Amino acid sequence: MHLEARQVLPELLRQLNVDRPVLIGHSDGASIALLHASQFPVTACVVIAPHVFVEDIAIRSIDEARRLYEHDPGERGLRQRLERYHADVDNAFYQWNDVWLSAAFRHFDIRADCRTIHTPLLAIQGLNDEYGSLQQLREIEAHILGAQTLELSSCGHSPHRDQPEQLTDAIARFLNSVP
């Protein structure tokens, strides 16, 4: 995520001639947005189901995802559902899953990076997120001055699926308040 935030995204923005973007990221993408905003100027940042440190709940759910991916065949299995989004589904899945389940990744912690973020920020978390708890939002509030948070009820890890209208409204209200 550090590589994506500090090398890949800046190069993409340079090629697109984009200065001070509004970053909106989900899950690992939210962590990438936070890391980028900690070192580069951005207009605003919206992070949905972010990970600023590794929680046991995430490891348990990611381990269960691996079990489902490998042992739940058929047209409704996890692998088959992911195929519609990825040209190389095995590569996409295992690059994510292997990293998160590696012993080295248990030390992933970007709370110190968050202290250097001085841009309007909205952090959103579903109350039923199977990959993270509200402690992610509490840590963001503790480390980013002025961070706004939103907790969505009846919502898991994917607010864009579980609460699309509420998510869209919250992001629009937040962005309308950004100078």
Image (cartoon, rainbow, N blue to C red):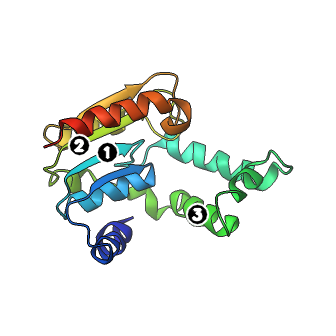
Disc 1 on helix, strand or loop? Answer: strand
Residue 166, horizontal then vertical, whole percent: 43, 27
Disc 3 on helix, strand or loop? Answer: helix
Which amino acid type is shown beneath numbered disc 1? Val
User: Earlier along the polypeptide chain: callout 3 or callout 2?
Assistant: 3
| Other residues around mark 1 within 10 Å, as few (<14) / some (14–19) / many (≥20) | many
Residue receiving disc 2: 121
Q: Residue at x 25, y 50 (%)?
A: 111
Which residue is nearer to you in this view: 84 or 61? Answer: 84
Describe residue 22's horizontal placement relative to residue 83 as left or right.
left
Where, quadrant-wise, is the N terminus in this rendering? bottom left
Residue 34, quarter of picture? bottom left
Which residue is nearer to you in this view: 169 or 116? Answer: 169
| Other residues around mark 3 within 10 Å, as few (<14) / some (14–19) / many (≥20) | some
Residue 119: which numbered mark, if any? none
Where, quadrant-wise, is the C terminus in this rendering? top left
| Separation of marks 3 and 2 at Cα, in angstroms | 30 Å
Residue 75, horizontal then vertical, whole percent: 84, 49
Residue receiving disc 3: 98
Residue 46: which numbered mark, if any? 1
